[in-house]
Image (cartoon, rainbow, N blue to C red):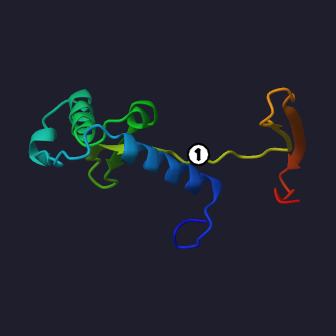
């Protein structure tokens, strides 16, 4: 549960925890955000555009979390009538990737006890495309 008593799914929980860690460990939290001129960036190569966006992102986002977990997403948009192509870059901290299930998949998890003398226990479940994960 978060502060508004709304439960989070695992993805939202991971995003929340990483954002909190990043906010507390950010070494450049008080810097002002700078805008770059979009007319100028269209004259740059893709690599230079990406570097400019990344450097701008790092001016306000510089922590161990951003070092390990942030990246750039390249967005390409092509006009169907004139074939004009627009390329832009945007920073991300987490990507959602759908994983298709074909047939049955074996999901494994380990339960690690607090007591260091107890060995971790492995649990496995077979999940099919028709099997709900809650069952």
The N terminus, quarter of image:
bottom right
Dividing the picture into quadrants, the one containing residue 59 is top left
Q: Measuring from the top left, give residue 53's x and y in whole percent.
A: 24, 39
Dividing the picture into quadrants, the one containing residue 63 is top left
User: Residue 118, can we see it?
Assistant: yes
Q: Measuring from the top left, give residue 103's x and y in whole percent.
A: 86, 44
User: Residue 92, can we see it?
Assistant: no
Taking depth in this image into account, of 15 and 102 the one nearest to the observer is 15
Q: Residue at x 80, y 44 (%)?
A: 102
Q: Residue at x 16, y 32 (%)?
A: 44
Q: Is residue 48 above or below residue 85?
A: above
The C terminus, quarter of image:
bottom right
Secondary structure type for disc 1: loop
Taking depth in this image into account, of 100 and 96 the one nearest to the observer is 96
Q: Residue at x 62, y 67 (%)?
A: 7
Q: Measuring from the top left, give residue 92's x and y in whole percent.
A: 40, 44
Q: 52 left or right of 75? A: left
Crowding near the residue tagged with mark 1, few <14, some 14–19, many ≥20 C-alpha atoms within 10 Å: few
Q: Measuring from the top left, give residue 110's x and y in whole percent.
A: 81, 36
Q: Is residue 83 above or below residue 119?
A: below
Q: 18 left or right of 121? A: left
Taking depth in this image into account, of 59 and 23 the one nearest to the observer is 23
Q: Which residue is mark 1?
A: 97
């Amino acid at each position: 549960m978060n502060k508004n008593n709304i439960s989070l799914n695992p993805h939202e929980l991971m995003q929340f925890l990483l954002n909190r860690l990043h906010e507390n460990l950010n070494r450049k939290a008080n810097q002002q955000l700078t805008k770059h001129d979009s007319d100028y960036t269209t004259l740059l190569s893709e690599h230079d555009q990406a570097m400019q966006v990344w450097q701008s992102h790092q001016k306000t986002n510089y922590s161990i979390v951003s070092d390990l977990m942030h990246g750039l997403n390249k967005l390409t948009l092509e006009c169907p009538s004139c074939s004009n192509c627009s390329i832009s870059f945007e920073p991300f901290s987490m990507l959602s990737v759908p994983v298709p299930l074909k047939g049955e998949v074996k999901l494994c998890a380990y339960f690690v006890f607090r007591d260091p003398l107890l060995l971790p226990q492995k649990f496995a479940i077979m999940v099919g495309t028709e099997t709900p994960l809650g069952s």
